[in-house]
Image (spheres, helix red, strand yellow):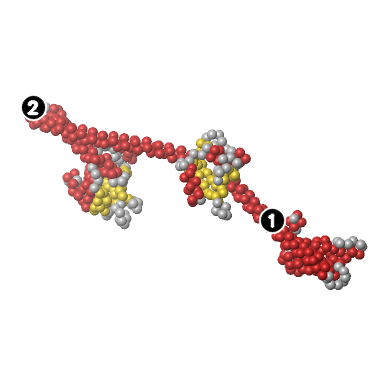
């Protein structure tokens, strides 16, 4: 066997060349015959049979069954011719036929046995080569698996670990020699999201499973992993091993839990804030409504007192009466604006698609009284269709136009422009621009607050609720409001809102 394993190339050469194979049969026969004749000459008898059998064995070993049969035939003829009486003749006595038959049978058995053994040795040789190739491949695969930082280990169907890569050592803290041979669930104290029987059923049915598991490290700390299992089967389809890969998602799970907790807290605060806002709106509405009656009484009695006592009062007292009436009127305007502002928060939006140009014309008609006697140049650009609550947006345009008329009062030639700016593919942007007194941009954040004013009330009248109303309406339409201005250089107010579906208009 050792001789055969040591000379695979020689066997390969004989197997490929018929001349070499049959030449070996003849050569071995000639050598053995020469040795047998030489032994007979020097008085060594009965050595020819073992020598011929040796020649047959060598031939069958290296050249195969065909040349071995040739060696058997040649050996039988030579034995009969050179070593059997009468010598140098092929005559065979009838009494020697059984002897020849036994010899030939024994030779053929030797050929068969040698051929079988040679085939077995060849199979062993091929199996060894295959095993070496498999070992080489597995070694390369194991080396590659050790290069990755992913956690990979293999366990048999009894969950006993048979392979443990470097990534598993880094994550869990156990070395390979400590983990291999241990039961994985007990070593890692695995916590499953569902009963393990369900997981095994799915694994056997589909050949794979994945999910989140909680495991323990060597130091006792917990880790959450995204685990993927792959089932390995043998040639008969029987499950033999499970390849498990784990990715550490502990930090991600912690962040998700934090985000979920923050979302819950935010939802609670949002609900509380919504409730508080509703209470504030109801409170503002109630207070504003309840203030109307005493305010009307105050203004009414002040007017009666002015009519009856103005003749007997001096100029200072009459001035006081005028101040009382003006303050009552201003208070009434504040209450009306506050009620309108509160109603916007409670009213439901009735959105439709409407012509914005027509809406601007209606708003101009409504503010016409404020512009009487004024020299105002109106510039109305091409406006698109608008999708929203028509009555609410009319209130927006009335407030913005009133604002522009008011703050251009000091200009001999007022210029007010309404147009559409370049927005995005999803949003429309509308603007109202004037050449009025403008404002300082460092106070721009105060423009849209309730009761916020950037100019003295004795210079420009107003309650400070108009722009807050504009902002509330646009926010309810899913848009935003902003402004740009320069002191004594005019101002531009913008608002945006989603375009109507299918609109292809561009500014």
| Mark 2 surroundings: few (<14), some (14-19) or many (≥20) residues within 10 A | few
Q: Quadrant of the N terminus?
A: bottom right
- Element at label 1: helix
Say which residue appears at 34% left-offset and 53% top-offset.
425
Disc 1 and disc 2 in contact, CB within 8 angstroms: no
Q: Which mark is residue 206?
A: none
Say which residue appears at 66% left-offset and 53% top-offset.
131
Left or right: residue 9 versus residue 45 is left
Label 1 belongs to which residue? 124
Q: Is residue 371 visible?
A: no
Say which residue appears at 57% left-offset and 45% top-offset.
156
- Of residues 502 and 454, the one drawn nearer to the viewer in this rendering: 502
Earlier-in-chain disc, 1 versus 2: 1
- Of residues 46 and 445, the one drawn nearer to the viewer in this rendering: 46
Q: Quadrant of the C terminus?
A: bottom left
| Mark 1 surroundings: few (<14), some (14-19) or many (≥20) residues within 10 A | few
Say which residue appears at 48% left-offset and 42% top-offset.
196
Q: Quadrant of residue 162?
A: top right
Left or right: residue 121 versus residue 314 is right
Relative to 32, residue 349 above or below: above
Mark 1 or mark 2, whichever is nearer to me: 1
Q: Is residue 144 visible?
A: yes
- Of residues 473 and 172, the one drawn nearer to the viewer in this rendering: 172
Residue 273 point in image, percent of width and height:
31, 36
In three-dimensional space, the C-alpha distance between marks 1 and 2, rounded to whole angstroms, equals 137 Å
Label 2 belongs to which residue? 312
Residue 222 point in image, percent of width and height:
51, 36
Left or right: residue 120 versus residue 250 is right
- Element at label 2: loop
Residue 435 point in image, percent of width and height:
27, 46
């Amino acid at each position: 066997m050792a001789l055969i394993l040591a000379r695979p190339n020689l066997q390969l050469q004989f197997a490929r060349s018929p001349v070499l194979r049959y030449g070996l049969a003849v050569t071995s026969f000639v050598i053995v015959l020469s040795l047998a004749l030489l032994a007979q000459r020097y008085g060594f008898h009965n050595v020819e049979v073992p020598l011929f059998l040796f020649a047959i064995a060598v031939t069958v070993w290296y050249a195969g069954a065909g040349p071995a049969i040739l060696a058997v035939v040649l050996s039988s003829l030579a034995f009969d011719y050179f070593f059997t009486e009468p010598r140098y003749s092929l005559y065979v006595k009838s009494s020697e036929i059984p002897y020849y038959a036994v010899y030939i049978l024994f030779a053929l058995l030797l050929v068969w046995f040698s051929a079988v053994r040679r085939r077995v040795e060849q199979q062993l040789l091929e199996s060894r080569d295959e095993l070496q190739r498999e070992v080489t491949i597995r070694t390369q695969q194991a080396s590659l698996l050790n290069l990755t930082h992913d956690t990979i280990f293999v366990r048999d169907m009894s969950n006993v670990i048979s392979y443990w890569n470097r990534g598993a050592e880094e994550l869990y803290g156990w070395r390979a020699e400590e983990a291999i041979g241990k039961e994985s669930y007990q070593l890692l104290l695995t916590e499953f999201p569902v009963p393990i029987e369900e997981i095994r059923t799915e694994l056997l049915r589909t050949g794979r499973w994945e999910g989140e598991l909680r495991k323990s490290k060597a130091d006792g700390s917990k880790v959450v992993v995204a685990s993927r299992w792959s089932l390995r089967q043998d040639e008969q389809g029987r499950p033999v091993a499970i390849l498990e890969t784990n990715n550490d998602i502990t930090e991600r799970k912690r962040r998700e839990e934090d985000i979920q907790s923050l979302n819950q807290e935010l939802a609670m605060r949002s609900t509380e804030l919504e409730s508080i806002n509703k209470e504030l709106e109801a409170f503002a509405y109630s207070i504003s409504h309840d203030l109307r009656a005493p305010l009307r009484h105050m203004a009414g009695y002040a007017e009666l007192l002015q009519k009856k006592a103005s003749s007997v009062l001096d100029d200072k007292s009459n001035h006081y009466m005028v101040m009382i009436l003006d303050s009552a009127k201003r208070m009434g305007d504040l209450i009306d604006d506050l009620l309108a502002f509160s109603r916007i928060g409670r009213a439901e939006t009735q959105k439709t698609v409407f012509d914005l140009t027509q809406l601007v014309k209606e708003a101009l008609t409504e503010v016409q009284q404020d512009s009487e006697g004024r020299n105002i140049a109106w510039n109305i650009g091409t406006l698109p269709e608008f999708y929203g609550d028509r009555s609410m947006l009319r209130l927006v345009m009335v407030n913005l136009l009133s604002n522009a008329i008011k703050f251009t009062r000091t200009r001999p030639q007022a210029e007010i422009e309404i147009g559409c700016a370049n927005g995005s593919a999803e949003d429309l942007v509308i603007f109202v621009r004037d050449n009025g007194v403008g404002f300082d941009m460092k106070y721009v954040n105060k423009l849209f607050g309730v009761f916020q004013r950037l100019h003295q009330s004795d210079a420009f009248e107003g309650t400070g609720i108009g722009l807050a109303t504009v902002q509330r309406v646009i926010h309810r339409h899913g848009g935003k409001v902003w402004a740009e201005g320069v002191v004594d250089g005019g101002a531009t107010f913008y608002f945006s809102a989603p375009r109507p579906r299918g609109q292809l208009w561009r500014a």
